[in-house]
Image: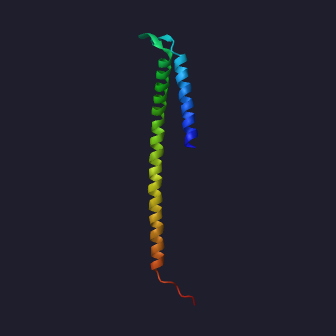
Amino acid sequence: MRYVAWTIKLILFAVLVLFAYKNMGPVDVEFFGQARFGGVPLVVVMLVAFVLGTLLGVFLMLPSTWQRRREAARLKRELKRSARSQAQAAADSADQPALKPR
């Protein structure tokens, strides 16, 4: 299975390298009319856009991720507390003398 995964990764890498090679044409980039960059390779512009989009997505997911982690920690504490109380109840019932039937 490892060989299959590495083969897929190698193919994906080769496709990305070929894509970058075919998209090396220069483009002019203007950022909100203020900053102008001329002759930037298209692949660089696409890579920067991809990285910025990924970072934005990660930052937008962080609050919900933190909330889920807090909830999981709370549920683990609750489960431990419940297990301890059940163990204590079982120990208490074992300590009590058995009732004699009449």
Is residue 80 toward the left or the right of residue 1 in the image?
A: left
Q: How is the image coloured?
A: rainbow
Query: In which quadrant of the rendered image does the N terminus lie?
Result: top right
Q: Position of residue 102 (x, y in %)?
A: 57, 90
Q: How many marks?
A: 0
Q: Nearer the viewer, residue 20 or 29?
A: 20
Q: Position of residue 29 (x, y in %)?
A: 47, 12
The image shows residue 17, relative to residue 41, as above or below, that is below
Q: Position of residue 58 (x, y in %)?
A: 47, 33
Q: Residue placed at 52% from the left, 85% from the top?
A: 99
Q: Residue placed at 48% from the left, 53% from the top?
A: 75
The image shows residue 15, relative to residue 79, as above or below, that is above
Q: Position of residue 74 (x, y in %)?
A: 45, 52
Q: Residue furthest bottom?
A: 102
Q: Residue placed at 47% from the left, 78% from the top?
A: 94
Q: Residue furthest left?
A: 35
The image shows residue 98, relative to residue 90, as above or below, that is below
Q: Residue placed at 55% from the left, 21% from the top?
A: 19
